[in-house]
Amino acid sequence: MFTSELLSENPDSATVERNVADNAKLMVREAIIENLDIQTKTFVIVDMGCSVGPNTFFAMQNVVQAIKHKYHSTCSQIEFHVFFNDHVTNDFNVLFESLFSDHQKTYFAAAIPGSFYGRLFPSRSIHVAYSCYALQWLSRVPKGLIDKTNKGRIHYDGASIDVWNAYVDQFEKDMEVFLSARANEMVHGGLIVLVLPSIPSEQHSKIGYRILTFVESSLIDMVNEVSQLITLIILSLF
Ligand SMILES: C[S@@+](CC[C@H](N)C(=O)[O-])C[C@H]1O[C@@H](n2cnc3c(N)ncnc32)[C@H](O)[C@@H]1O
């Protein structure tokens, strides 16, 4: 599988995402040119799950250039408003500090903090909604995992079919919430572009997400260190 091979070969996740976005670049451009069906002088674009850059800058520039290319003969004075969305805890200061120092200002920019698993914008206000490598993050630990055995794990690779199904259920619920929020926010004739890692369903038991195994063992080490520290503090109190 293309994405899992990339993940296995290169643990630098920002590079993985950059490679994925680069591979999708032409498809995104073609999708905009062929499918976007809007008449306006101000295009409103959002990158959902933008992180702090720089990948989001290249992605938004690609979207802006594709729209300019599509409409250059019919409308010479198009303006762009790009919203950068991520969790409220995302470091938007880092994003905006580097945004216009490294890149030519071809659009107006603003942050829209909050979860994309819910409404972010007023009805019928977005022309292009884009998200790359973010929708694989679920909104919560799958409910079904509470009574399934996946203790000490952070994902389903190598787990039982019950664990896999619990993740699938949560993903389906999250996607429904995501899509119904976007259904309200999108302008008629607009475009949603979603780039996310995927695997064939028959490969669920061994997908080889080595990067997640590294993250998992680091988290467990941290938890163990903290619990040892707490024990030491408690012992030193007596
Ligand atoms: C792997 S990064 C991808 C960043 C960027 N799109 C890229 O391609 O390099 C995933 C980002 O999605 C964000 N994210 C995850 N769940 C989210 C949610 N429910 N709402 C908004 N952002 C979310 C994370 O905070 C993180 O910054």
Image: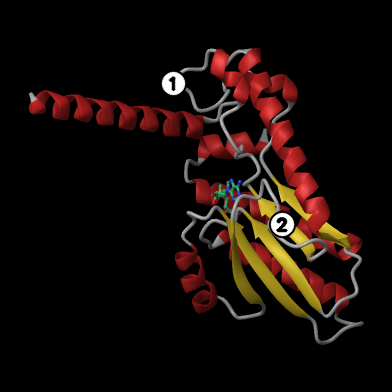
How busy is the neighbourhood of tag 2: few (under 14 within 10 Å), some, or many (20 plus)? many
Question: Is residue 24 placed above or below 92 in the rendered structure?
Answer: above
Question: Which residue has dot 2 on it?
Answer: 130
In this view, the residue farthest toward the front is 238
Disc 2 residue type?
A: Tyr
The answer to which image quadrant residue 57 occupies is bottom right
**x%, y% of residue 58?**
62, 65
Q: Is mark 1 within 8 Å of ligand 1?
A: no
| Nearer to me, 99 or 174 | 174
Q: Quadrant of residue 225?
A: top left
User: Which amino acid type is marked by label 1?
Assistant: Gly
| Residue farthest along the bottom direction in this orientation | 77
Q: Residue at x 52, y 51 (%)?
A: 14
Quadrant in which the N terminus is drawn: top right
Of 24 and 233, nearer the camera is: 233
For image coordinates 55% across by 52% down, the residue present is: 87
| Left or right of 20 on screen, residue 69 | right
**Mark 1 lies on residue:** 152
Q: Position of residue 32 (x, y in %)?
A: 83, 62
Under circle 1, the secondary element is: loop
The front one of 107 and 93 is 93
Q: Residues within 10 Å of mark 1 (few under 14, many from 20)?
A: few
Task: Name which of mark 2 and mark 1 comes first in the sequence.
Answer: 2
Q: Is residue 15 left or right of residue 47?
A: left
